[in-house]
């Protein structure tokens, strides 16, 4: 019964899963070697990408905040005037 649960968890028999993982690792490793990418460089690039996205994300939030402030300079006084005028009716 334990083998059945383990097989279900792994997605097949342990030996078959190990063989498929080894083959996939060989293919990916060969492709990485062909492209001149080592694991350390890959991890560094992924972290730099994430950092860049986060930095740009906060820049975008700041830019949107600026747009809201610019629009509010026009919208809020118009809204306030319309409320004052409609309040007198």
Image (cartoon, rainbow, N blue to C red):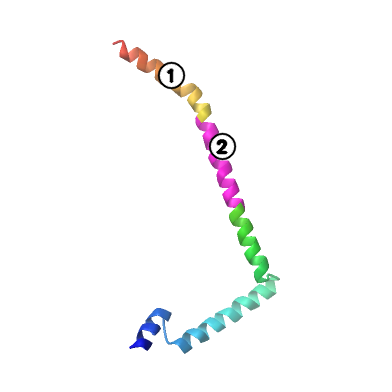
* Residue 75 position in % (x across, y down): 45, 23
Left or right? Give the position of 36 relative to 62: right
| Residue drawn at the location 40% of the way across and 79% of the way down | 9
Mark 1, Cα crowd under 10 Å, few <14 / some 14-19 / many 20+, is few
In the rendered image, residue 75 lying in the magenta stretch gets the answer no
Name the residue carrying label 2: 63
- Tell me the CA gap for discs 2 and 1: 23 Å
Q: Residue furthest top?
A: 88
As drawn, 59 above or below 25: above
Identify the residue at horizontal 63%, vertical 65% (top origin): 43
Tell me which label, 2 or 1, sits earlier in the chain: 2
Q: Mark 2 Cα within 10 Å, few/some/many (few <14, many 20+)?
A: few
Please give the residue where the numbered disc 1 appears in the rendered image.
78
Q: Which residues are magenta?
A: 52-68
Q: Quadrant of the C terminus?
A: top left
From the top left corner, tell me how far across and down residue 24 is, in percent: 55, 79
Q: Position of residue 88 (x, y in %)?
A: 31, 10
Percent of width and height locating residue 74: 49, 22
Magenta residue check for 56: yes
């Amino acid at each position: 019964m334990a083998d059945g649960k383990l097989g279900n968890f792994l997605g097949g028999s342990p030996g078959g899963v190990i063989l498929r993982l080894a083959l996939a690792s060989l293919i990916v490793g060969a492709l990485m070697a062909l492209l001149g990418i080592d694991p350390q460089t890959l991890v560094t690039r992924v972290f730099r990408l994430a950092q860049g996205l986060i930095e740009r994300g906060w820049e975008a939030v700041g830019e949107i905040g600026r747009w809201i402030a610019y629009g509010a300079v026009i919208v809020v006084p118009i809204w306030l005037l319309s409320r004052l005028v409609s309040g007198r009716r």
